[in-house]
Amino acid sequence: MPAPIYKGTFPVKTREETKYLDKGKIEYTVTQVYKKESVVTGTIGASFSYAGKSLALTAISVSTKNGLSEVTHTYTGGDSTAPEVYEVVASLSEEPIASHVAFTASTG
């Protein structure tokens, strides 16, 4: 089977995905196709702004087939100062009226 013919300019963005993780973190993955001889990859740790958050390049994957290279960059980051919220129940043995008090605790 002959290789597919693509008429247009490279790189071609083939897939883009955004995952919103815990504690305000974001994982952004983008896949692009390049001609085999013109593959461009980023530098691990390089950062950029996406959706108002600063993300750093954490992983690069390159696969080559039929004269084309598919490059996937994964960026992670976000708000590292987002507070962690816990549901807490306090037992107060000295105070019989308020034996169980529910409240919210936050690290922020």
Image (spheres, grey):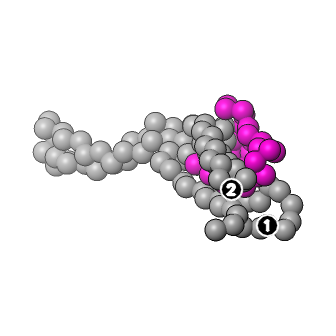
Is the residue marked by circle 1 packed among few (<14), some (14-19), or many (20+) residues within 10 Å?
few
For the record, the magenta segment spans 26-54
Is the residue marked by circle 2 packed among few (<14), some (14-19), or many (20+) residues within 10 Å?
few
| Quadrant hosting residue 33 | bottom right
Q: Any magenta on residue 37?
A: yes
Disc 1: which residue:
6
Question: In the rendered structure, which amino acid carries the disc numbered 2?
Answer: Asn
Mark 1, mark 2: which one is toward the viewer? Answer: 2
Q: Position of residue 67 (x, y in %)?
A: 73, 53
Disc 2: which residue:
66
Q: Any magenta on residue 102?
A: no
Pick the front one: 34 or 105: 34
Pick the front one: 80 or 15: 15
| Quadrant hosting residue 16 | bottom right
Residue 65 seen in this snapshot:
yes
Q: Which dot marks residue 19? A: none
* Residue at left offset 65%, top offset 49%: 64
